[in-house]
Amino acid sequence: MTAPFIRLHPRDCVVVALSDLAPGIPLGEPDLVTRDAIPVGHKIAVVAMAPGDPVRKFDQIIGFATKAIVPGEHVHVHNMGMGEEFDRSFRAGETAHPTDLLPLAERATFQGIVRPDGRVATRNYIGVLTTVNCSATAARMVADHFRGPALEAFPNIDGVVALTHGLGCGGVQEGDGMDILRRTIGGYAIHPNFGAVVIIGLGCENNQLARLMEVQGLAAGELLHPLIIQDAGGTAATVREAVARIKAILPKVNDIHRQPVPASHITVGLQCGASDGYSGITANPALGAAVDLLVRHGGTAVLSETPEIYGAEHLLARRAADETVAAKLMDRIAWWEDYTRRTGDEMNNNPSPGNKKGGLTTILEKSLGAVAKAGTTNLIDVVKYAEPVTEHGLVFMDTPGYDPVSATGQVAGGANVICFTTGRGSVYGCKPAPSLKLATNTALFRRMQDDMDINCGEIATGQATIEEVGQAIFEEILATASGKKTKSEELGVGADEFAPWQIGAVM
């Protein structure tokens, strides 16, 4: 490509710089040159705009000019803002269409781990979960016992991982906040990627272990062990007991083998973080192409981060399978608008400083790029945070935009692979689900080779198409689900990123 920019749609008011541009660079049209220094990934005006005029990118409104803008000028926070009105008429199901599912005989398979009850895993961990922050150290002590050579005789076990958090007490004993925490812990306790689980409580916390197990339908057994520190005789005694129980079940957890299973058993959590101006141009659309392939093969993708679809929710609602699904989505948007009002915040508190440095100006711009991860198939269901995902196809889960919290909810709902697009360079990992990192630009992919799994930057330079990279992502999902380690797994990242969503007062 010879042009120094990307034009995404003929009706757009702006184009996106392919590299750092100095003033005076010709932009391919008579008398049109850059008037400012334009950082890579940032927007350049190609038409004149008066104050209040809409700014279009992706042929969608991403904001409004806050002052006069001339062609060739840098368009960013200094001359563009969110505005008050934009097209959010969602017309439920307007663009929904039957999914072109492949015949069963033509669908992809992967090498999965089939549990005795029929659930299919992509990894084989032992989990040490906690009801409350007060039992976090004990859980880590248990996991630490199985570091190094402790599991050498059990090569089919990926590790013993402690997932701790800062919640479980200091708030209401029942209500939305506690429901979310219990759903999250319960979802992890039954996640197929855990061959066995130990849950450690303190004993006096609001999140009582017995109540957690009752509400979540959990039952103690050979592969699920509840322990309470105050009943067991203290921290050291609890650690000894947990270690002994895990040692006793290591042979059983290790006794697995991978076998061909349909791709319909893959549920991918879709994430984007540390985004930049390329996110909505390269990695997100390529991931969307991979999602379309996965859905055609019978699999499931979970889009989340409700504050980061804000301003683009109408596009998802138009793809809703029916009016009920669209109404559920709009209900979650309304909840967030009320939630942020009550807390003195606003939905445009985002993009983050790193997003803005990468070229994103408003949440509308970020959201329009973010929903590209969801591909083009119908939206078939909307679920709350950490609720089980039971439908096959594209599902939306209501979560915050903060990546660790969002992905934690997706895994609790059943995601067994995470695909994470990043332009600035996220290093996120997510035990027990493997996390693939998709770089939006080649410079990032080269700079952070130890963290990035796939380079989507070749789309921007014309070396590859969205469809070609989407196919590569789909194939990497299958390979990862079959046991191939991601970069974050090779680095050992993923235990400390467990982060349940906290809402409500801490008292």
Image: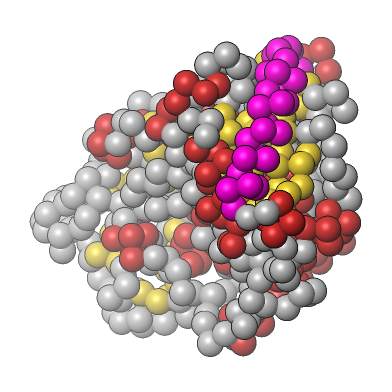
Give the vertical position of 72 relative to 169 (above or below).
Answer: above
Q: Is residue 228 left or right of residue 157?
A: right
Quadrant position of residue 194: top right
Instruction: Kindly identify the residue that appears in the image at 75 percent across and 20 percent down.
Output: 252
**Can you give x and y, in whole percent of width and height, for residue 148 in the image?**
45, 26
Which quadrant would the N terminus be assigned to in this image? Answer: top left
- Residue 355 appears in the rendering: yes
> What stretch of residues is rendered in magenta?
235-262
Which quadrant would the C terminus be assigned to in this image? Answer: bottom right
Instruction: Kindly identify the residue that appears in the image at 81 percent across and 66 percent down.
Output: 327
**Can you give x and y, in whole percent of width and height, for residue 156 in the image?**
62, 17
Instruction: Kindly identify the residue that appears in the image at 60 percent across and 16 percent down.
Output: 154
In the foreground, 41 or 242:
242
Q: Is residue 468 left or right of residue 23?
A: right
- Residue 54 appears in the rendering: no
In the foreground, 384 or 491:
491
In the foreground, 59 or 106:
106
Residue 80 is inside the magenta segment: no
In the foreground, 102 or 139:
139
**Can you give x and y, in whole percent of width and height, for residue 338 in the image?**
66, 82
Instruction: Kindly identify the residue that appears in the image at 47 percent across and 80 percent down.
Output: 83
Residue 244 is inside the magenta segment: yes
